[in-house]
């Protein structure tokens, strides 16, 4: 009797290990079956998005005005969302029988051995019957060998779906190769109304900087490939953009501060922008999702002039005009004109005594 209990304890421990291994494979098989259900539900929506992406690579939506493109994108994405919601609502969780059947198919098991594990013996009065049934389960689990769940089958079901998927993938690959480096920009422009793709020519830009009123110099015209000289604080930047439907924008980077920015629409395709420069940095002109121009500008602060006295004149030296001992005030853009007024010292007035 003691040996029978020992064998029962060992059998129970081994049975628990095999059962844990079977439970792990069942979880894996459940995930595989869920993936096989989810992937077909996603395929129609992905095909619709792929078709619109193909149209964007061919620059078809970009030919529409921004308003019509917005309506088209919103309507197409709404249709995709409705189809996705409908397909996902049809998903059903896999049953234990489906999971065991998948394991039996992937593992090459015959005669449905996992279904036998779900059987329960009829209640018998003898303890030996329970021991025999437990030994039967242990031998059955041990005979299963290596259990597998397999990989999910992701190929579209049905010949028409396979042909459609192959043609769409091939078309997307060819269109991407033809677009080259412009492919990401074309796709973004197709899905984002008001954005131009990289193949659209940049608008014509005229830009210049007018010095402030206290430094009446000539305006500085900005052109690509030429360095920009230093400008004084308070200088006024003016930009005219021709050939753009929507308005451009100025943005300060790396410490650049542009104050009193103004924007004026000259005609349906022309814009004028103005801003006052107060700090050094990079000024970027952007519009319709692209950077149109970028100017690194050094702004010199408007500091007060520094006037100081130098060494006094030698004894007996006569000073005429501007004294040599007066140092010239230094300014960022040269020496300004200044006026020196010399006044004689005020002599003390002696008090007048009144007589008797």
Image (spheres, grey):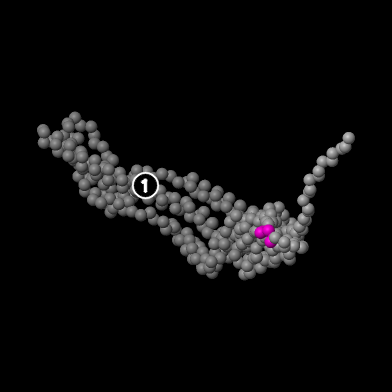
Name, please, the residue furthest toward the right: 356
Q: Secondary structure at mark 1?
A: helix
Quarter the N terminus occupies: top left
Question: In the image, residue 39 lies at what x, y percent?
Answer: 44, 53
Chain part drawn in magenta: 310-314
Task: Decide if residue 234 is in sight here.
Answer: yes
Q: Main secondary structure of the magenta part?
A: loop
Residue farthest to the top, as pictured: 125
Q: Left of 20 or right of it: where is 321?
A: right
- Quadrant that contains the C terminus: top right
Residue 114 placement, left or right of 154: left
Residue 175 in view, yes or no: no
Q: Nearer the viewer, residue 221 or 154?
A: 221
Question: What residue lies at 77% left-to-right and 58% top-to-bottom?
Answer: 339
Residue 95, placed above or below residue 1? below
Which residue is at the front of the view, 110 or 22? Answer: 22
User: In this rendering, is residue 22 above or below 53?
Assistant: above
Number of marks present in the image shown: 1
Q: Residue at x 62, y 69 (%)?
A: 225
Does the magenta segment cover residue 17? no
Q: Position of residue 321 (x, y in %)?
A: 77, 62
Residue at point 77%, 55% (across, down): 342
Q: Nearer the viewer, residue 212 or 317?
A: 317
| Location of residue 281 (image quadrant) | bottom right
Residue at 61% x, 52% y: name it: 74
The residue identified by callout 1 is 30
Instruction: Work out whether residue 180 or residue 108 is closer to the camera in this orientation and state it.
Output: 180
Which quadrant of the structure image shows residue 54?
A: bottom right
Q: Position of residue 286 (x, y in %)?
A: 63, 59
**Residue 195 at x, y percent in the picture:** 62, 59
Left or right of 181 in this view: 259: right
């Amino acid at each position: 009797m003691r040996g029978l209990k020992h064998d029962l304890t060992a059998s129970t421990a081994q049975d628990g290990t095999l059962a844990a291994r079977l439970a792990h494979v069942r979880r894996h098989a459940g995930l595989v079956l869920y993936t096989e259900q989810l992937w077909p539900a996603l395929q129609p929506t992905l095909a619709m998005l792929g078709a619109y992406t193909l149209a964007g690579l061919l620059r078809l939506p970009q030919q529409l005005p921004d308003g019509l493109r917005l309506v088209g994108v919103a309507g197409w994405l709404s249709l995709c969302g409705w189809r996705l919601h409908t397909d996902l609502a049809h998903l059903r969780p896999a049953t234990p029988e489906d999971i065991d059947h998948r394991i039996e198919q992937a593992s090459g098991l015959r005669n449905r051995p996992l279904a036998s594990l779900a059987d329960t013996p009829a209640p018998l009065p003898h303890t030996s019957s329970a021991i025999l049934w437990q030994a039967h389960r242990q031998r059955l689990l041990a005979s299963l060998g290596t259990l597998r769940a397999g990989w999910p089958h992701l190929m579209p079901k049905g010949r028409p779906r396979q042909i459609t998927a192959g043609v769409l993938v091939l078309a997307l690959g060819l269109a991407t190769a033809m677009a080259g480096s412009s492919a990401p920009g074309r796709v973004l422009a197709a899905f984002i109304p008001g954005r131009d793709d990289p193949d659209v020519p940049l608008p014509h830009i005229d830009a210049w900087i007018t010095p402030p009123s206290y430094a009446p110099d000539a305006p500085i015209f900005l052109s690509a490939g030429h360095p920009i000289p230093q400008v004084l604080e308070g200088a006024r930047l003016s930009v005219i953009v021709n050939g753009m439907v929507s308005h451009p924008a100025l943005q300060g980077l790396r410490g650049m501060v542009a104050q009193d920015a103004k924007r004026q629409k000259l005609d349906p395709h022309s814009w004028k922008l103005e801003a006052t420069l107060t700090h050094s940095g990079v000024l970027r002109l952007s519009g319709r999702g692209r950077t149109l121009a970028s100017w690194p500008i050094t702004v010199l602060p408007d500091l007060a002039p520094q006037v100081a006295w130098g060494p006094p004149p030698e004894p007996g030296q006569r000073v005429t005009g501007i004294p040599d001992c007066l140092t010239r005030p230094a300014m960022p853009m040269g020496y300004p004109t200044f006026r020196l007024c010399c006044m004689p010292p005020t002599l003390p007035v002696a008090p007048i005594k009144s007589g008797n």
